[in-house]
Amino acid sequence: MKAPSAKLGVEGVRKVFGDGPSKVVAADDVGFDVRDGELFTLLGPSGCGKTTTLRLVAGLERPDAGRVVFEGADWTPLPPFQRSIGMVFQSYALFPHMSVFENVAYGLRVRRLSRAEVGQRVNEALELVGLAGTRARRPGQLSGGQQQRVALARALVYHPKLLLLDEPLSNLDAKLRVYMRGEVKRIQRQAGICAVYVTHDQEEALSISDRIAVMQAGRIAQVGTPAEIYEQPASTFVADFVGKANFLECTVLERDGEACVIRCHGARLRARAATGSPPMPAGTEGLLFFRPERAVISAVQEGASGLLARVGDIEYLGSLVRYTLDGAGGWTVLVDAPPIGGIRQAGEEVLITLAPDQTQVFPKGSR
């Protein structure tokens, strides 16, 4: 099957704000592509450069180096209004005195489209976002989720080729955010448009994205599918930022291709070498990484292989129980387990076992 073609190319863009000691490198050699019909997410902590990168794509900022290409055309010198984009911001920016219909129609009227075409486009956009019955209402009469869908309709009514979304759900409560991220995905798919989505919310990114670029200090740390980012993080930063992560100091005893035999707090374990990691010969100090839900805890049995620990804090979360487990060497890890069969008691000694393909070993000190 032929891979989808790249619609958007961001090629080595760099953006610096200020100079001298106060200089901030907001984007540093950032490069990625967005494929036809893809929802591509820029994910990272505050200040990592994701919004600056989005503004460079939109033309709201000019890069100091690099370029932005769309469908083979160089967008870099073009102002925002000459780029076929629709934008949705964290703030809905709706006109409170206008109806839903008038809010969505406003930009089309500024562009002097005919009354018939304005009506047709607005009705189509409101139908797409599921708000056809709210045309006469004002924003103050709508819920937060409905207001965000009006903002989406306003962005899509221009028939843009690219949709840009900057933290669009951050003002919504937790339950509504979960619902709206599904709606954003549905609307984007139904519109058949490629989109770049900015968020700091890892769960949000994993749930809606076709691919994710994790950003760190103005640079791209890793690009991959949600499963690749979560299951095979390219660095300890990505592993720690996306989801819960456990890290334990270890020593490499043997290296066999992608596999390592390690010594970790008295236990001899087999684990995977981190994807793309440098050679780690015998004697290399490393960090064993695993997700809390990938570990298995059981009663201690003589001769069994694994990490010995005692149950510390217990957090009941409904579908799972989160255990804080403490090792004799002063180390601590989290393990998530279903409550089936009962909940373990604080102070109970347990054995932690890890399947080799559910772990990774990073060189110690790597980021």
Image (cartoon, rainbow, N blue to C red):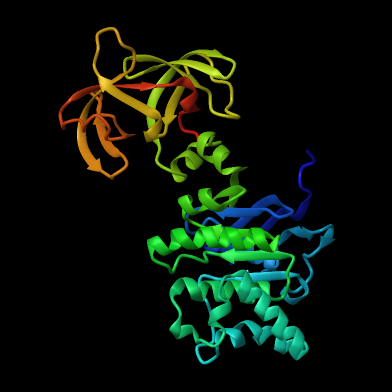
Report the residue that reaches farthest toward the right. Answer: 72
Left/right placement of residue 83 relative to residue 197 reads right
State which quadrant residue 25 falls in.
bottom right
Q: Is residue 367 above or below residue 171?
A: above
Q: Position of residue 307 (x, y in %)?
A: 31, 20
User: Quadrant of the image for the N terminus?
Assistant: top right
Q: Residue at x 84, y 57 (%)?
A: 72
Q: Residue at x 68, y 84 (%)?
A: 107
State which quadrant residue 338 falls in.
top left
Q: Is residue 131 above or below residue 9?
A: below
Q: Position of residue 284 (x, y in %)?
A: 48, 19
Q: Position of residue 27 (x, y in %)?
A: 62, 57
Q: Residue at x 75, y 70 (%)?
A: 84
Q: Is residue 30 above or below residue 89?
A: above
Nearest the viewer among 361 and 111 is 111
Nearest the viewer among 73 and 248 is 73
Report the residue that reaches farthest toward the front. Answer: 133
Q: Is residue 338 above or below residue 271?
A: below
Q: How many marks?
A: 0
Q: Position of residue 80 (x, y in %)?
A: 72, 73
Report the residue that reaches farthest toward the top. Answer: 303
Q: Residue at x 76, y 70 (%)?
A: 83
Residue 236 visible, this angle: yes
Residue 195 visible, this angle: no
Nearest the viewer among 143 and 202 is 143
